[in-house]
Image (tube, rainbow, N blue to C red):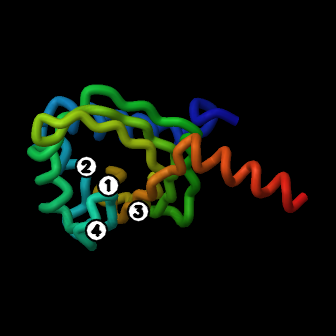
Amino acid sequence: MGHSDDPLAAELHRREVEGWENFRRKDKRAYADAIADDAAGFDLTGTGLKDKAAVVGDVDLATVTHYEMHDFQAHRISNGVALVHFLARFSGSADERPFEVVMYIGEVFVRRQGRWLLRWFQNTAAPTAEVSGTLDTLRAQDG
């Protein structure tokens, strides 16, 4: 079942695309508007737990020129809580240096005043093809 068959998944996928587009356009107001005031989480910067202000501040630190989402899934946890997870691939620049990132993103959304807002996130670096190939080789040797 694709997310177009599931109204919750379709709505949260649309919200996720809007978030990426707002970041890419550097529209901090729109980006912040989709994040709960009590949001928190961990990203790949290694700076520790980030609050909403720090997450929104990242818009000024990086320029995203391309993004893709793969294997997008959304699951209703309760009436006003949903879990989203997917593989993200994006590229751009920070401090005029190019970057390319592949990571797994897990997020918890809460429904407040009729809107889904990001409440928690956890980003985890995805293994590179080299690491994945090595793990596949090791699994084959064990099997």
| Residue with the mark numbered 4 | 40
Q: Secondary structure at mark 3?
A: strand
Please provide percent x and percent y for residue 6: 60, 39
Judged left or right of residue 30, residue 84 is right
Judged left or right of residue 76, residue 97 is left
Q: Nearer the viewer, residue 107 or 59?
A: 59
Residue at the top extreme, as displayed:
65
Q: Quadrant of the C terminus?
A: bottom right
Pointer 4 and pointer 2: residues touching (CB < 8 Å)? no
Pointer 2 and pointer 1: residues touching (CB < 8 Å)? yes
- Which residue is rendered at x = 64% and y = 33% of the image? 2
Disc 4 and disc 2: Cα gap in Å?
13 Å
- Image quadrant assignment for residue 20: top left
- Which residue is rendered at x = 36% and y = 65% of the image? 120
Q: Given the image, on which type of amino acid does mark 1 rest?
A: Leu
Residue 34, disc:
2
- Which residue is rendered at x = 25% and y = 61% of the image? 36
Q: Given the image, on which type of amino acid does mark 3 rest?
A: Gln
For discs 3 and 4, the disc positioned in front in the rendered view: 3
| Residue with the mark numbered 3 | 122
Mark positioned earlier in the residue sequence (2 or 3)? 2
| Residue with the mark numbered 1 | 117
